[in-house]
């Protein structure tokens, strides 16, 4: 992680066993209160479809984690700025070289959406892939879509963020994109929105291009 990105880190995460269960203690840093307001202004300018949560982030993360992963010990609030999360097996999808991991991430995103939830920032680092079970789990619920965004549009942007982030990390092709859509399970009529999000002139795409990432090969696959 670069020094610039470290300066925008909002939470510290450390291993913690609670009542005999392995897990992680996640604590919001003091600087988060100063970073989130300008950060959200920047995200709005990019039309990213993502908003960082300030007050109430802990309750939101625990609630969404419990709803999403009800087959593991429940997440807990340890205070307004600290939570405990049970350990989930796997490693970040962005680090994987297994094509099954990428399709599994879209399958997990589809499951997450069918629970009535939207992530806001489902980049490939927010999915853990366990090669043994060949299953992905979505994590890190500190973001939401901005107020007023309807559910189909928010889901479309979730899908597009994951697809673009995988491409940005050198994963995927137009053929893979078709498999990702199939793994997701339903387009719910959101492809026109997602296609706009992937358009060459879209602010987030322009920002990524400025960072040096090449244009994806699959925008027209959304038609």
Image (tube, grey):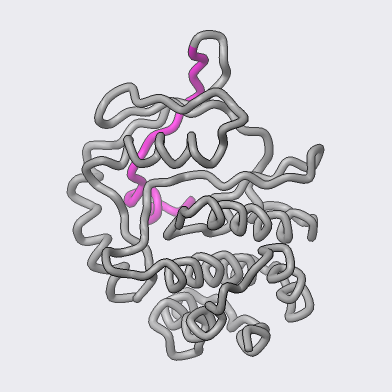
User: Based on the displayed image, in which of its 4 quarters is residue 131 positioned?
Assistant: top right
- Please determine whether, in this image, residue 159 is positioned above or below residue 54: below
On screen, residue 88 versus residue 80, left or right, reads: right
On screen, residue 22 versus residue 205, left or right, reads: right
Q: Position of residue 84 (x, y in %)?
A: 43, 25
Residue at the spot x=48%, y=28% of the render? 85
Highlighted range, magenta: 1-18
Q: Quadrant of the C terminus?
A: bottom right
- Please determine whether, in this image, residue 110 is positioned above or below residue 160: above
Q: Position of residue 151 (x, y in %)?
A: 42, 66
State yes or no: residue 2 in magenta: yes
Residue at the spot x=28%, y=75% of the render? 45
- Please determine whether, in this image, residue 27 is positioned above or below residue 10: above
Q: Nearer the viewer, residue 210 or 149?
A: 149
Q: Position of residue 171 (x, y in %)?
A: 70, 67
Q: Position of residue 191 (x, y in %)?
A: 56, 81
Q: Nearer the viewer, residue 72 or 139?
A: 72
Residue at the spot x=57%, y=66% of the render? 165
User: Based on the displayed image, in which of its 4 quarters is residue 218 positioned?
Assistant: bottom right
Instruction: Count how many numbered circles sit on residues in the image.
Output: 0
User: Based on the displayed image, in which of its 4 quarters is residue 56 positioned?
Assistant: top left
State yes or no: residue 43 in magenta: no
């Amino acid at each position: 992680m670069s020094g610039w990105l470290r300066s925008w880190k909002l939470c510290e995460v450390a291993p913690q066993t609670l009542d005999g269960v392995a897990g992680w203690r996640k604590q919001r840093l003091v600087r988060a209160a100063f970073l989130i307001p300008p950060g959200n202004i920047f995200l709005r300018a990019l039309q990213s479809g993502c908003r960082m949560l300030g007050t109430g982030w802990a309750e939101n993360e625990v609630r969404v984690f419990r709803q999403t992963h009800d087959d593991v010990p429940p997440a807990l609030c340890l205070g307004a700025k600290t939570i405990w999360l049970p350990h989930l097996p796997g490693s970040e999808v962005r680090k994987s070289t297994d094509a099954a991991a990428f399709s599994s991430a879209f399958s997990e995103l589809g499951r997450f959406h069918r629970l009535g939830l939207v992530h806001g920032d489902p980049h490939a680092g927010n999915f853990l892939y366990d090669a043994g079970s060949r299953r992905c789990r979505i994590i890190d619920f500190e973001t939401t879509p901005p107020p007023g965004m309807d559910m189909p549009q928010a889901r479309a942007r979730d899908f597009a963020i994951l697809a673009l982030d995988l491409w940005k990390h050198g994963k995927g092709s137009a053929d893979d994109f078709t498999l990702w859509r199939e793994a997701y399970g339903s387009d719910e009529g959101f492809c026109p929105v997602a296609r706009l999000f992937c358009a060459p002139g879209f602010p987030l795409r322009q920002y990524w291009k400025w960072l040096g990432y090449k244009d994806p090969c699959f925008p027209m696959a959304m038609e």
